[in-house]
Image (spheres, rainbow, N blue to C red):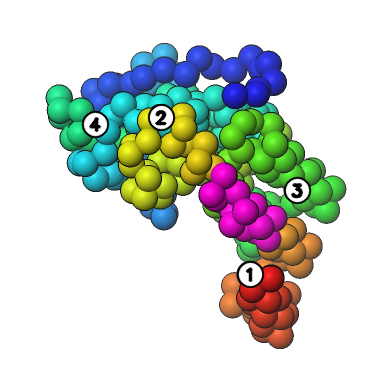
Amino acid sequence: MKLGAQVLPTYRAFSLEDLKEATKNFESSSYIGEGTAGKLYKGRLENGTFVAIRCLVLSRKHSIRNLKLRLDLLSKLRHPHLVCLLGHCIDGGADDCSVDRVFLVYEYVQNGNFRSHLSERSMEKVLKWQERLGVLIGIAKAVHFLHTGVIPGFYNNQLKSHNILLDEYLVAKVSDYGLSIITEEIHKNEARADGQRAIQSMSKASEGLCLEDDVYSFGLILLEALIGLRRSEKGGAFLPYEMEDMIIYHRLSFVDI
């Protein structure tokens, strides 16, 4: 895998006890929310570092060996505009084919998501145009890295404005990237072929279908950054229904090409 040299925390394996201690046994106060990628918790490690912990529920039939190979590939995605993956925890029995859950441990990015800085009713929190441009450039750099900076490339990265996190300096960091290698494709391509060969064939098959998805999704984020709130989120007509219909029409046309 082709990677640029970066000084970032060393990736490690966590025990389930480590994560229970960090989240006080996953109590409700540590719960952040839930999306298509699973539940998300905020935790604090023994050294005082705050982390975000994503819980992915998997089927018991998946091979731990195959899963570890995929996690190893995911762990190598290091870039200033990606939320840093610090480690993982595989929750399963002793049997190699009894994986219950996988926990992904990320750096905690404390300044909310891009969408909240566009649609907050408090005008003091709304980003200025120059700040929005800086966020968009950061997203573009992250997507370019995911597509071309690693071999094989990572596509279908769930790009949405609420998946773009901002740090205290308003630096954009893409979250939930590359999860299809675990959550989707593992269900379709469980190790009938050996490790790297399976992942490479999976990447080639998905590249043509998913590259356009990331490009289209980035276009929607760009539009949202330029126009702001949708009519349904505020009384004004920042995004008229006619424009929403036009976007849907062009996407359907684009998919048919």
Residue linked to disc 3:
136
Q: Is residue 47 above or below residue 112?
A: above
Q: Is residue 207 magenta?
A: yes
Point out the tag, 3 or 2, that comes first from the N-terminus. Answer: 3
Q: Residues within 10 Å of mark 3 (few under 14, many from 20)?
A: many
Closest to the camera, between mark 1 and mark 3, is 1
Q: Are marks 1 and 2 in contact (CB under 8 Å)?
A: no
- Disc 2 designates what residue? 195
Distance of mark 1 from mark 3, alpha carbons? 24 Å
Query: Residue at label 1?
Result: 255
Residue 133, labelled with which disc?
A: none
Q: Are marks 4 and 3 in contact (CB under 8 Å)?
A: no
Q: Nearer the viewer, mark 1 or mark 2?
A: 2
Chain-order first, disc 1 or disc 3: 3
Which residue range is magenta in the image?
204-218
Task: Give the residue at x 70% y 36%.
Answer: 148
Amino acid residing under circle 3? Leu
User: Seen in the image, is 205 located left or right of residue 46?
Assistant: right
The three-letter amino acid code for the residue at tag 2 is Gly
In the image, which is nearer the foreground, mark 4 or mark 1?
Answer: 1
Residue at image location 40% in from the left, 50% down from the top: 184
- Cα separation between marks 4 and 2: 21 Å
